Image: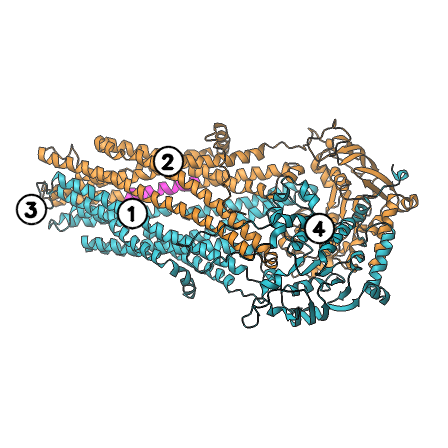
Chain colours: A orange, B cyan
Amino acid sequence: MTAGAPLPPEPSKAAFDAQLTRRIFRYLRPYLALVVGAVLLSLAFSGIQPLFGLIQRYAIDHALTPFVTGVTADREPLLRTLTVAALTYMGLKVLEFAVQYGSILTIGYLGQNVLRDIRADVFTKLQRLHLAYFDQNPVGRLITRVTSDVDAINQFLTGGLVSLIQSAFLIVAYAVIMLSVDWRLGLVSFSVLPMMYLASNYFRRHLREAFRNNRFQQAVVNSKLNENITGMTTVQLFGRERRMALDFDHANRALLTANENSVKWFSLFMPVMAVLGQVGIALVLYFAATRLLNQDAAGVAATTGVTVGTLVAFIGWTTNLFQPIQDLADVFNNLQAAMASSERIFEVLDTEEKIQDKPGAATLEPFEGRVTFDGVWFAYDQAVTASTPDTDDRWILRGIDLDIQPGESVALVGATGAGKTSVTALVSRFYDVQRGAVRVDGHDVRDLAQHDLRRHVGVVLQDVFLFAGTIESNLTLNNPAISHERVVEACQYVGVHDYIVSLPEGYQTEVRERGATLSTGQKQLLAFARALIQNPDILLVLDEATANVDTETELRIQQALLRVMKGRTSIIIAHRLSTIEHCDRIVVMRKGRIVEQGSHRALLEKGGYYARLHRLQYAQGNAAD
Amino acid sequence: MDSLRTLWPYLRLHRRQYLIGLVAVVIANSLNLLPWYFIRLTIDGVTGQTDADPATAGITGAQVLLYALGIVAASATAGFFMLVMRRMIVIASRQTEYEVRRDIFSHLQTLDKPYYDRARTGDIMNRLTGDLGAVREMLGFGAWQIVNIVSGFATAFAVMFSLSWQLTLIVMALLPLIVGLLTYMARQINKRHTAVQEQNSLIAAKAQENFSGARVVKGYAIEDREIEDYRAMNLELLRRNIALIKVDGPLRSVMNLLLGLAFGVILLVGGRLILNGDGTFTVGMFTQFVGTLERLAFPMLMVGWITGITQRGLSSWRRLRELFEARPLVRDERGRVNPNIQTLRGDVEFDHVTLRYGERTVLEDVSLRVPAGTFLGVTGPTGSGKTVLGQLLTRSMDPTSGVVRVDGHDVRTIPLRTLRDHISVVPQEPFLFSDSIANNIGFGMGNRDLPEVPTGVSVVGAPPPPDIPPNPDMERVREAARLAGLAGDVEDFPQGYDTVLGERGVTLSGGQRQRTAIARAIVRDPAILVLDDSLSAVDTETERRILDGLREVARGRTVILIGHRISTLRHADQIVVLDGGRLVEQGTHDDLVAAGGHYAELERLQRLASDLDADDEPIRDAEVAADALEHQPIPQEAVK
């Protein structure tokens, strides 16, 4: 329970991966016009920026200094020059603003569109992936893919690439103009740039490390807080407050130290950069001014050597040059962070879709609803293949043979882990079997179009999964083809209509917090209504005996279930005795095998596993009274 | 303002740091204007403005060198003061953040169960992360920026005014326009940023829902509709982001444009002043004026932000104060508690105890005595108030009326620490910590002599928190694990007793969790042991074994066992049946069976069930029934 846990290692520095970059670039292709526009605009912006120094220089040298130094006393032409310079300056500022705004909008529009495309691609891909993928990957991780990882790519494009291009253009533009105006002064002002780049790079490296440590310590503090708040009663009952407070204080101090450390780096970083910048200005001032003085002494004409205007312009240019240099120092860090994220995103996009439609997969029309299991062996573990020995523990289903007629209702009964749920999952083809075949209307499900198959197969889970939206949209699952009348009819049929219309907005009532406000019974009835409205030919039901339901609701659920089952092939994982009894056939499963099957009566007479089970439950029947 | 007053105790702890830091800001701001002064002197020197003859230079090369060095020296000194400012103010704000977090944590430890029943963990967490961060930003960045703005404006205007009052007036006329526009933009950015955040969380929620509902989405083949939905939300996010970029993107360019236009005007007017020829305004002064004005760009930008930072900080501080102001109902009341009560033998008495939660009556006039060292069995239907008996005993809450006594003392007069040290509770769903098994079992051991974390004091100069002595006495931990029937399981874990539980470690089964909780309870050697349905997730066989172990421990202790299994209840010295908060039956097993009430019926049903060689308990569920049959041989002929 010590707080100073070691920092997790930094993600591998894949530096600059050309292949990944090409893939990201592929997202830019639909917006080629925008890309070209963005490049041209930043080129234009870079071209305009250094001009302001030229105008200042012109104004000082041609409108102000000649008068001040007594070269001319005629103010009229000077004033005219001054006005022209000032107006040009302002006009150019407006143009610069327009270009810059245009460039920001273009880049923003471009970046946001690419983001949207990537997000949509990842989401769409996840819709196509097999169910097992969702079993293996925690939801939190998948959400990170469509949120922060996508944002990191945005950083790559806007923070990385754009600032790389922009900074490069600006540096070139300033360098060209400074060298062409006065190459010696130009070199003087460039002299601090390498220092600046190195210092910036050095500090940012340390800052990044410090920030990473901050985040880590913050996560430690947060998880301790969360645990303590949740388990506070336990802490109090066992008198552990002081130990917990001490333990928390260690973590809290470690966070403070980490924070102080990054403040220390930051407090060095900013002044050092500022001082370096001023050193550059001081150098320019010194060299320009001494040359001016020497020129005066030597009587060199002001037009060919350094002028006051040149001095002022160079001070401005030198200051403006610092920003792109610092940006450049950070570009590669941004790129690196984006690489890791894009790698993860492409990993999702490249995931093999384990369950795919065969080319020309069939759709069944008409659909009868016969379900056949033909020597089915199945394991969730992908490493298990047809040749894995029968004795392997990983087999979940071990040679299931089952033939269910259209319209027949079958109850699956058995202990936890007997394989009941797997049987229903295979009918929907959520997984593929290793041996044997699952057939619907005589066709191997692997030869059918998944979507079409699942449209005919309805699943009723014990805990109805409610989406954000209205009650009605949850029943129709947003299918616009389903009429309101049909929804009402179905709800009346299962007996949940009265409840729904008693809600303030009836069928249009928003479902909150995944139906937290609905009772267990109401949720089950909604699940049945949903199944009825979707009108599947084959119905798979997970029917849990619910402890928190009163007798009346229990009866209502029972009735609704029987009504929904009527006229469809139904496979029910049954928990309630009464449900089981009403099914045409009962299949008793044990450890992946079918041990008994037959009608309720037949199985009772047989006096096997089911008969014993029934006696156990029967005892309960009395206890409930 | 009231919020600021309550913040004062924390600010006071670092007032020296804040004060030094703020003075440093003012000094740095003034020093930062010096380079432009040196530039002006140089320019005016080389243009001959500093002596009588404008045709000759007024300065020497040595002076130029001096000015150049002056620039470096001024900026280095300013840089030093900026460094001091950050190390004072920003670090002080981090320290305040630490202190508030530390104190709230300590305060949270005093709040009682009724508080935690009402509060949501997520809400408390949000306050301790987001809100605390907003307060810190207000204290650190906010305080610095306010002073920076004020002193920045003051020094810059003083300099500008000394250079040219005409130009300064022009700037003053333009200033409200610039600040107004920037403030408006800042507000728009805030608003649009919130809109983007909202849409972002909608999208995340949609993704969360879709991924966790994958079974339904695929089951009903509604992927395409989901993709359509997602597309629409995605498009809306794009729209909102672009709306944000429209105001957020050009913030700097607007600033740049406004300053550029101001420069144009200053060039026009200032140029004329120079050309006046009276020598009161020079090219150097013009350059200094413009340079000084540019230094105002950042403070002007900040004016718009600072109100937002302050407002957020103050309302966040109010939310944090709500945590501080929460008061526990259960606590050691001065004047009532008798600190001399140090040990308890375990004689328990409920004297006409009634407990109400709002409208609901949980216990109604329950009177009951459990002599020290005896075994009480409690049973009754769900919601009959069984669990509450244990909670009243440990003072997780206090009764509405009536008195709970231990050893004849009203529990409210016993120091909480003493009371809880002598009682161990095993709840039905125990909460274990993500720590090693050893530490989880030794949870209640060796906590007595630890120092308290001081609150309300500055962290500056405070000694580092003492090392925490490792708590469990491994001998006792092992023994408790053995008695609780957990030892065998632990030995199978990769790191034995050092195996970490929870997210970062192994996940225990329900039965293992319960047995860990039992070990955790008995290792403390309590005078009173409360077992609240704490064997519901273990099978009958294991339960019997554990109870045999407990019988060893139970000798000389008061045991209160809440449960349904007659096989365990029957050994109790006394059994009570609760129903709807009332005590409806009371007596020994034989008494109650003879009385033919609720208990007798329970006994009859369980006897029937055990005749079927199944579990003692009635089974509501076919799967559970099948699970119970799992370990029994199936007649061969029944297998296909």
Indicate the position of residue A110 as horizontal and vertical percent values: 46, 38
Q: Is the Cβ of the residue at disc 1 closer than 8 Å to that at disc 3?
A: no
Which amino acid type is shown beneath numbered disc 4? Leu
Is residue A102 part of the magenta span, yes or no? Answer: yes
**Cα gap from disc 1 to disc 2, whole angstroms:** 26 Å
Instruction: Give the residue at x 57% y 70%.
Output: B337
Residues at marks 4 and 3 on the same chain: yes
Please give the residue where the numbered disc 2 appears in the rendered image. A328
Query: Secondary structure beneath disc 2?
Result: helix
Query: Secondary structure beneath disc 1?
Result: helix
- Which of discs 1 and 2 lies nearer the camera? The answer is 1
- Which of discs 4 and 1 lies nearer the camera? The answer is 4
Which amino acid type is shown beneath numbered disc 2? Leu
| Neighbour tally class for label 2: few under 14, some 14-19, many 20 plus, Cα within 10 Å | many
Q: Is the Cβ of the residue at disc 1 closer than 8 Å to that at disc 2?
A: no
Please give the residue where the numbered disc 4 appears in the rendered image. B483
User: Is residue B81 rendered to the left or right of residue A499?
Assistant: left
Please give the residue where the numbered disc 3 appears in the rendered image. B52
Q: Residue B184: tell me if it is visible.
A: no
**Cα gap from disc 4 to disc 1, whole angstroms:** 66 Å
- Which of discs 4 and 2 lies nearer the camera? The answer is 4
